Amino acid sequence: MIDLIVLHSISLPPGVYGGPEVEQLFTNALDWDAHPYFGQIRDMEVSAHFFIRRDGELVQFVDADARAWHAGASSWRGRENCNDDSIGIELEGLEGEPFEAAQYATLSQLCHRLQERYPVTHIAGHEHIAPGRKQDPGPGFDWARLQHDLAWSSAYFPDAVTGTDPPIA
């Protein structure tokens, strides 16, 4: 049962926006020799359900009913392996840098659509489900803005964002 949305950030190469590389990565079409950084991620087996570009464009890679491999070693809500019961959303961006208004608008719309289809009760960053291993979407992501845009209770959000402990489900 999908009840978690996990937010990530990605740009390829890091800090470069607007190119085709992220889509190429998630569709197994990336030219590994096109940039020196790509050699570092060559053996990663990763996928995501959705990708939100800087201009707010939404791209879907994996059907929301199918498992995507976005979380890796992870734990949230007292459960291990968040890939089993979550939707992974990649935001075009770099850890620590701010995201665009268009991305928040698309993200909010997408989260509402997902909640209409699934019993979503939690939303967290990769940094929350894999602390010490991942830092995305990072300090540039405005959790308060997202909570305001969604009008969801603080119980949906990580304690690091709201100052309260998340409920154990």
Image: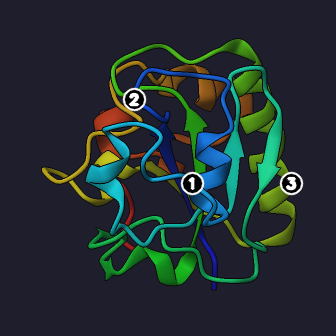
Residue 15 relative to residue 64: left or right: left
Residue 118 relative to residue 44: left or right: right
Name which of mark 1 and mark 3 comes first in the sequence: 1
Residue 29 relative to residue 98: left or right: right
Tell me if residue 92 comes above or below residue 167 in the rendering. above
The quarter in which the C terminus is drawn is: bottom left
Q: Which residue is mark 3?
A: 113
Q: Secondary structure at mark 1?
A: loop
- Asked whether the residues under the numbered discs 2 and 3 touch, taking CB atoms below 8 Å apart as contact, a structural biologist would say no
**Mark 1 residue type:** Leu
In the rendered image, which quarter is residue 106 located in?
A: top right
The quarter in which the N terminus is drawn is: bottom right
**Mark 3 residue type:** Arg
Q: Secondary structure at mark 2?
A: loop
**Which residue is located at x 50 percent, y 21 percent?**
16
Picture coordinates of residue 14 (x, y %)?
39, 29
Q: Secondary structure at mark 3?
A: helix
Q: Disc 1 versus disc 3: distance between alpha carbons?
A: 30 Å
Q: Residues within 10 Å of mark 2 (few under 14, many from 20)?
A: few
Q: Which residue is mark 1?
A: 30
**Which residue is located at x 77 percent, y 19 percent?**
102
**Mark 2 residue type:** Pro
Q: Disc 2 versus disc 3: distance between alpha carbons?
A: 30 Å
Q: Along the line of sight, which residue is nearer the eye, 108 or 45?
A: 45
Q: Disc 2 versus disc 1: distance between alpha carbons?
A: 14 Å
Task: Indicate which disc residue 14 carries.
Answer: 2
In the rendered image, which quarter is residue 133 located in?
A: bottom left
Picture coordinates of residue 103 (x, y %)?
71, 26
**Which residue is located at x 67 percent, y 24 percent?**
18
In the rendered image, which quarter is residue 53 located in?
A: top right
